[in-house]
């Protein structure tokens, strides 16, 4: 199965916007693989891990069509891993057409934080309200450590991590 790493860098990507250290200077000069986007990976053609801010530019650069994504694993809701603006484009009022249903798996806490960020993009929007899930064509699967979710022919088991104490324990 093909895995495309759409991004592998830290929260700020690399090179840093205002940095002149040797590593960042080399990234600006050499470009290519030395320009690293924020974390995201595409498994096969239909499963994405983290829907971050660099997903579209990475997909174009790698020649990957991400319109086929049907399954989405979100590790946590930090801005370098989740860009709520991508979700707003899923509702019909945004003029999007032919949107296929999307299955999302994340921890309950991650879903709550994603909903908070989504409501900043569109007041009242939520991944915890049925009317918004229908508008966005998203099915949410809340998973905890040790639980398994089935996406197509894949079985994915959540594992616990502690990335940010303020976020609480995340599962995915």
Image (cartoon, helix red, strand yellow):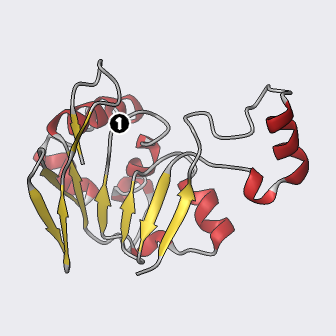
Q: Is residue 69 above or below residue 126?
A: below
Judging depth in this view, the residue of 156 and 112 nearest the camera is 156
In which quarter of the view is residue 6 placed? bottom right
* Count of marks overlaid on the render: 1
In which quarter of the view is residue 60 placed? bottom right
The residue lying furthest to the right in this view is 29
Q: Residue at x 57, y 38 (%)?
A: 10
User: Could you say where residue 111 lies in the image, as x and y percent from the top left?
Assistant: 22, 39
Which residue is tagged 1? 77
Q: Residue at x 83, y 54 (%)?
A: 31
User: Could you say where residue 54 lies in the image, as x and y percent from the top left?
Assistant: 58, 50
Quadrant location of the N terminus in the rendered image: bottom left
Would residue 12 be found to the left or right of residue 14 on screen? left
In which quarter of the view is residue 28 placed? top right
Would residue 73 be found to the left or right of residue 48 on screen? left
User: Could you say where residue 132 lies in the image, as x and y percent from the top left?
Assistant: 21, 47
Judging depth in this view, the residue of 50 and 138 nearest the camera is 50
The residue lying furthest to the top in this view is 166
User: Could you say where residue 27 lies in the image, as x and y percent from the top left?
Assistant: 82, 45
The residue lying furthest to the left in this view is 147
Would residue 30 be found to the left or right of residue 168 on screen? right
Q: Is residue 131 above or below residue 6?
A: above
Q: Residue at x 43, y 54 (%)?
A: 89
Would residue 62 be found to the left or right of residue 108 on screen? right
Q: Dot 1, how many residues are within 10 Å of its Cα: few (below 14), some (14-19), or many (20+)?
A: many
Q: Secondary structure at mark 1?
A: loop
């Amino acid at each position: 199965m093909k895995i495309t790493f759409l991004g592998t860098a830290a929260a700020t990507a690399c090179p840093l916007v205002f940095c002149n250290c040797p590593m960042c200077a080399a990234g600006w000069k050499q470009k290519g693989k030395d320009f690293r986007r924020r974390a995201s990976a595409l498994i096969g053609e239909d499963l994405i891990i983290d829907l971050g801010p660099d997903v579209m530019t990475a997909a174009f650069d790698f020649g990957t069509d991400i319109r086929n994504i049907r399954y989405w694993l979100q590790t946590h809701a930090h801005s370098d891993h989740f860009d709520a603006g991508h979700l707003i484009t899923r509702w019909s009022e945004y003029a999007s057409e032919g949107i296929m249903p999307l299955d999302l798996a994340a921890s309950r806490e991650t879903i709550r934080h994603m909903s908070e960020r989504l409501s900043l993009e569109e007041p009242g929007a939520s991944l915890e309200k049925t009317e918004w899930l229908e508008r966005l064509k998203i099915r949410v699967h809340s998973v905890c450590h040790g639980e398994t979710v089935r996406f197509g022919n894949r079985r994915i088991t959540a594992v616990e991590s502690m990335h940010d104490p303020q976020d609480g324990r995340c599962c995915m």
